[in-house]
Image (cartoon, grey):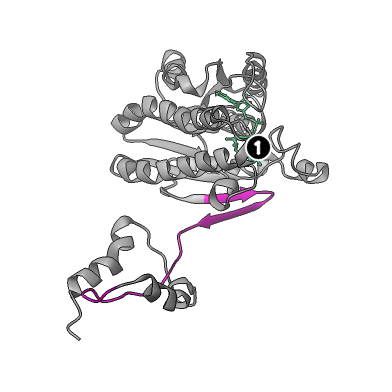
Amino acid sequence: MANELRFDGKVVIITGAGNGLGRSHALLFGSRGAKVVVNDLGGGHTGEGKSSAAADKVVEEIKALGGEAVANYDSVEDGAKIVQTALDHFKRVDIVVNNAGILRDVSFPKMTQDDWDLIYRVHVLGAFRVTHAAWPYLRDQGYGRVIMTASAAGIYGNFGQANYSMAKLGVAGFASTLAIEGKKKNVNVNTIAPIAGSRMTETILPPELIASLKPEYVTPLVAWLCHENCEETGGLFEVGGGFFGKLRWERTKGQTFRMGRAITPETVKSSWGKITSFEETEHPANVMQSMAPILANVQAGPSLG
Ligand code: NAD
């Protein structure tokens, strides 16, 4: 195909690429000319154990299709080692897909600090360590693409996933700032909240849904966001089962009280309808836009009446 989106000469690190979504991403990048670092710790889906088998299998699959790939078995908590694998084997790094993940689902009263810390370490600290080690290379070469993998559970909340929700919205916030810091150097950072049948979801979703929610329906978005022709940055996307959509913040127009008069809990109560009504809305896209009504009110000064 003449206008096929290709990644020739690009080096992509995909964490947790031994299974599910990461494997699907790795196979697609590998089939389109990228050199792929297939990272996977090879443990169970709740974070126990490790093995080289998962990453090795995907490397073999990529090579069998004529692609180039190397395995890495470190935990994302050792992110610098994963980036070093890219540099040792392929001499550069262009794209980082932060995908590795585990679950420790349990209702909040039963959640231990170990459940909380482990989920933080794999999803948030892991994404930090890998991205932080790759960042100077992306910035200095004036091209880089980073993907964070969030979840609807982080955006909307989900029973039994307090730790996972914290981590998943955490990486989305992390990406928002990285997108701002990377913009001038053509380092684009976007976040996906996918849904796909995998070993992670097979115990939660019915089998027929698992079969139709193929990871391959998510990967095309990751590939496009990582392509050099794609200028999107700072975006958050929900994707899966053939659906692709972008999210943004929406805020009620709200209620502003002129300063200089007492603002009491009763004042807030009496305006609750206006404060919470989405009949009129705004879509602040950055901190300045977020602060606009606050600054306008401060500049208007105290009420004279
Ligand atoms: P999966 O279990 O099939 O794959 C995750 C992979 O990450 C596994 O191969 C695992 O060995 C690896 N991994 C775990 N901890 C690691 C570590 N410390 N270092 C390196 N590798 C590690 O799950 P999946 O469904 O493909 O999930 C991929 C990502 O997508 C995860 O971040 C997950 O939270 C996210 N996600 C998935 C869904 C879904 O519907 N499947 C929904 C929302 C978010």
Image: 253 above or below 69? below
- Expressed as whole percent of the image width and height from the top left, the position of residue 151 reads 57, 44
Q: Residue furthest right?
A: 208
Looking at this rendering, what residue extends furthest in the bottom direction? Answer: 305
- Residue at the spot x=67%, y=32% of the render? 20
Q: Is residue 258 visible?
A: yes
Residue 279, x across and y down, in percent: 49, 77
Residue positioned 42% across, 45% down in the render: 173
Q: Secondary structure at mark 1?
A: loop
Q: Which residue is mark 1?
A: 106
Give the quarter of the figure containing the C terminus.
bottom left
Q: What segment is highlighted magenta in the picture?
A: 237-262
Question: Across the whole image, how many numbered discs are drawn on residues?
Answer: 1
Residue 196: image location, x then y, percent: 68, 42
Q: Quadrant of residue 302?
A: bottom left
Relative to 1, residue 124 above or below:
above
Q: Amino acid at mark 1?
A: Val
Q: Residue 1, relative to residue 157: is it above or below?
A: above
Quadrant of res 62: top right
Pick whichever, 96 or 297, lies toward us. Answer: 297
Q: Residue at x 42, y 16 (%)?
A: 84
Camera sees residue 2: no
Residue 268 magenta-highlighted = no
Q: Residue at x 41, y 19 (%)?
A: 80
Q: Quadrant of the N terminus?
A: top right
Dot 1, how many residues are within 10 Å of its Cα: few (below 14), some (14-19), or many (20+)? some
Label 1 lies in ligand 1 vicinity (Cβ under 8 Å): no
Residue 258 lies within the magenta run: yes
Ligand 1's image quarter is: top right
Q: Left or right: where does residue 197 sit relative to residue 192?
A: right
Q: In which quarter of the view is residue 216 placed?
A: top right
